[in-house]
Amino acid sequence: MNKVQQTRFDSLYQRHVNALTRQGKSTSTIEAYSRAVRRIAAFFDRCPDRLSREDLEAYFSSLIKTHSWSTIKLDRNGLQFFYTHVLKQQWQWVDIIKPPVVKSLPDILTQTELAHLLQSTRELRYHTYFFIVYSMGLRLSEALNLKVGDIDAQRMRVHIRCGKGRQDRFVILPEAALLALRWYWATHRNPSLLFPTGLTPDEQHSAKAHMDRGGLQKSFTTIARQCGIHKHVSIHSLRHCYGTHLIEAGLNLRAIQQEMGHQSPTTTALYTRLTDCVQQQSSVFINRMVDQLQALLGSERGQRREQPRAASKV
């Protein structure tokens, strides 16, 4: 772009970011939608406000060859927002690009596979994090953002703040999960964060940010591969395992939906292959499920109860 085009692009781009912010979009959405505008501007090396329909068709035809459909869908949504709210133009996006609707089911690990994976996780911070994600069915960011004050040891529940859709919820805290959190927190005693960044206890104690998402994902993938697990799994798979294992245990779908924070029961129903579910108290099922995994890990009950008194802050 020449200087004039660059100045115009910078102005439109900032209006795009401002519009996204005004509509209360999340940080990740703002970045994804903004990246879509930057990408198409770089592709044509000119400000995207002057692009024709043929230009857009050519762009998405090229994008299909190099990027996943999830990226293409984000770019389409980001550009649609740009044209609608910044340029005040309407486009028939279905005629230009329509990502296919994919209804795939996630791979699920058995509890034996989960136990093997956790036993193979040597770093305590990763071991604890993976265990907590599974034992409460949390999303990756929900577990990372946990703070000391979110743990209610009296009521045995955890306050999940600003989850998907920016909604709060409470989830049941299994006893084994509470003890694991106390044990790990005692190693760093960060005044606020449960999963602080840093490699040493001193670094973790003074950290102001949580562990790196990318490092967690890479470690999980590496450990799963080393365990001989050939299923397509990620940290989010632990959440899918949680929901599926509860259904297999007989907990009703409505209770699982509440624990996992699903807005639609249809999302929860994807986990089930059973025709009937036995209604029981959620806490009984969750504690039984997590205790079973704890037993597979080879931890004795008496050993789990002997935790440092200094860790009682959690």
Image: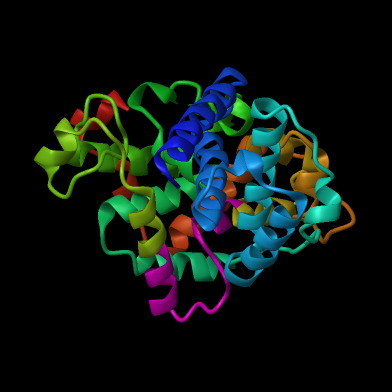
Most distant residue in the top direction: 22
Q: Is residue 158 something that shows in the picture? A: no
Q: Residue at x 64, y 67 (%)?
A: 62
Q: Is residue 72 something that shows in the picture? A: yes
Looking at the picture, the colour scheme in use is rainbow
Q: Residue at x 13, y 42 (%)?
A: 201
Q: In the image, residue 274 lies at what x, y percent?
A: 84, 59
Q: In the image, residue 241 lies at what x, y percent?
A: 61, 57
Q: Is residue 235 magenta?
A: yes
Near-viewer residue (73 or 136): 73
Q: In the image, residue 280 lies at what x, y percent?
A: 74, 39
84 relative to 55, above or below? above
- Locate residue 273: give its quadrant: bottom right
255 relative to 2, above or below? above
Side of 205 where 215 appears, left or right: right
Near-viewer residue (87 or 264): 87
58 relative to 169, above or below? below
Near-viewer residue (217 or 58): 58
Q: Residue at x 49, y 56 (%)?
A: 235
Number of marks: 0
Q: In the image, residue 270 lies at what x, y percent?
A: 78, 54
Near-viewer residue (168 or 32): 32
The segment highlighted magenta reads: 220-239
Most distant residue in the right direction: 275
Side of 168 where 272 appears, left or right: right
Query: Magenta segment, principal secondary structure?
Result: helix
Q: Is residue 4 magenta?
A: no
Quarter placement of the C terminus: top left
Side of 266 where 105 appears, left or right: left
Q: Residue at x 84, y 45 (%)?
A: 92
